Image (spheres, rainbow, N blue to C red):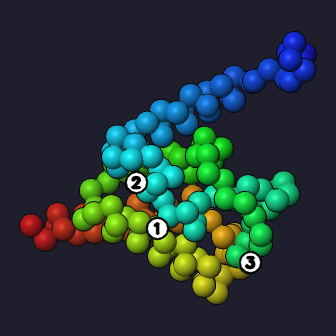
Amino acid sequence: MEQASNGQLPLTNYQLRARRDKSRYLEEIRLNWGADIEDRIPASIHPRKTLTPHRKPRVGDIAEIEDDPRNWSLELLRLLRNLSRKQVASLATMQDLVETEVRLRQSSTTTNKYKLAAEVIIDDVQRVIDGIDKRHASDETER
């Protein structure tokens, strides 16, 4: 790939698509939650800036919080967008559910390589979504 005139490599089709998708996800989250995502996900579990490639900062590491959600992973934003579509009692309930999943993962006895990740990860959000879906399904069967 040739360098652009500014000395940087041009963006690939994947990078352009990911940038567009992230913008769409962030806009839908903002509409669904009534505020920007960085105001809805507790700062204590925001994704961190990566210390080294392929290693997420762990609990106790000194790692800067990534405040710009456009730099969060595409998959994390997609799942958070899906979570924003779910009907929960309140925004505070959703925040508690996400924080609880992070704490449960961090305190689990498994050997998951992300067990000690200091931030919310896609598995945490997926477990919250699955839990909400399960509760909604059981509510439907009780009716």
How far apart, in angstroms, are the residues tagged by discs 2 and 3?
28 Å
In the visual, does 57 lie left or right of 8? left
Instruction: Describe the element under mark 1 as helix, strand or loop.
Output: helix
Left or right: 120 with respect to 60?
A: left
* Element on which disc 2 rests: helix
Q: Which residue type carries mark 2?
A: Leu
Binning the other alpha carbons within 10 Å of mark 1 as few (below 14), some (14 to 19) or many (20 upward) gives many
Q: Residue at x 66, y 70 (%)?
A: 118
Please give the name of the residue rendered at 35% of the width and 49% of the height, measured from the top-left corner. Answer: 33
Residue 8 in the image: state x and y as whole percent. 86, 24
Q: Is residue 56 above or below residue 28?
A: below
Q: Amino acid at mark 1?
A: Val
- Mark whose residue sits in front, 1 or 3: 3
Q: Look at the image and tell me in which quarter the C terminus lies.
A: bottom left
Where residue 87 appears, x then y in whole percent? Answer: 27, 56
Which quadrant, please, contains the N terminus? Answer: top right
Whether residues under marks 2 and 1 lie with C-beta atoms below 8 angstroms apart, the answer is yes
Measured as percent of width and height from the top left, residue 84 is found at 37, 51
| Residue 93 shows up from this direction | yes
From the image, tell me which residue sits under label 2.
83
Q: Earlier in the sequence, mark 2 or mark 1?
A: 2
Left or right of 103, for residue 85: left
**Mark toward the viewer: 2 or 3:** 3
Residue to which mark 1 is pinned: 98
Going by the numbered disc 3, the residue's amino acid type is Gly
For the residues labelled 1 and 3, say whether their Cβ atoms are less than 8 Å apart.
no
Which residue is at a point 61% across and 27% down the rendered structure image? Answer: 17
Residue that label 3 marks: 60
Q: Could you say which quadrant of the image residue 88 lies in? A: bottom left
**Residue projecting furthest to the top:** 5
Question: In terms of sequence position, does the residue under pointer 1 or pointer 3 come before the other?
Answer: 3
Front position in the image: 62 or 29: 62
